[in-house]
Amino acid sequence: MPAKGFALGFLTLALVTLGLASQSGCSSQPTPANLTPAAAAAADTPLMQAVGSGELAQVQALVEQGAALNTVTEQGTPLALAVTRSEREIAWYLLSRGASADLAGRDGVTPLMIAARAGDRRMVQMLLSAGAAVNAEARDGRTPVLVAARAGQLSVVKVLLAAGANVNVSQDGRSLLMHLVAAGDLLTAESVLAAGADVSYRSPDGTSALDLARASHNDDLQMLLFQAGAEF
């Protein structure tokens, strides 16, 4: 029995070694054709139609046949469409087969931003685990955490901050904290302050988060900002 166990162990080690060698050898090979970024109309992309219908089996069949995973259409990519429709199984399958987690359309909106805006925490976590860029920036300056915060998705904001989202990101001259104060979102403002948001940040015209809280006569936010070190 010991000899037999040794032989089985040796065989397992050999198989693992061969597998690793095979993987390292494949790393220098060109990217498969179905993973190359391309552009097309959604109507001309059967994979987009299958994703839109939520048909996992059809999606799998098309991918097995070589359907392009990273095609950008007017409806985004197959992955972006799956995220939009909250098709988690399809999204995970596409990611596992090599779909780009960050490929965006002309507006620069990534699948992570779509999930963040919808407040789909599980989808957000899935995309992050697949390597999605937590600080990706759309053409208008939006980032996933800005999108989530402005949509009132506190739980997703916390997930993104824990994953390294920039708490001091700004858009249109206003910091993340300022956008939250302007919206009167006390709870999310507390979270970003706890994560290190700069309470002294001022927009190009000199406006601060405290100025916005005063303008809206929001005593709770004013108190919160004072406690965080805001100055007159």
Image: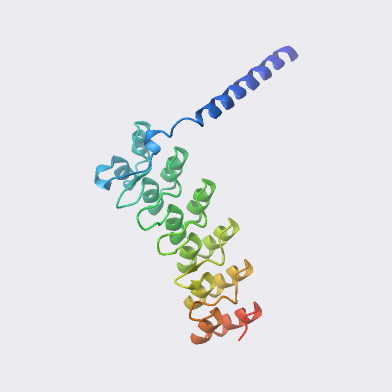
| Position in image of residue 189 (x %, y %) | 56, 72
Residue found at the very far right of the displayed protein = 2
Please count the marks in the image. 0
| Corner quadrant of residue 172 | bottom left
Residue found 47% across the figure and 30% down from its top = 29
| Position in image of residue 104 (x %, y %) | 39, 52
Vertical relation: 222 (above or below) 28: below
Front residue of 231/189: it is 231
Vertical relation: 192 (above or below) 126: below
| Position in image of residue 30 (x %, y %) | 44, 32
Q: For the N terminus, which image quadrant?
A: top right
| Position in image of residue 124 (x %, y %) | 50, 53
Q: Is residue 46 left or right of residue 231?
A: left
Q: Is residue 179 left or right of residue 46?
A: right
Q: Is residue 8 left or right of residue 136?
A: right
Vertical relation: 52 (above or below) 148: above
Residue found 40% across the figure and 47% down from its top = 79
Residue found 53% across the figure and 27% down from its top = 25
Vertical relation: 63 (above or below) 158: above
Front residue of 60/130: it is 130
Q: For the C terminus, which image quadrant?
A: bottom right
Residue found at the very far front of the displayed protein = 204
How is colour applied across the structure in the image? rainbow
Front residue of 180/33: it is 33
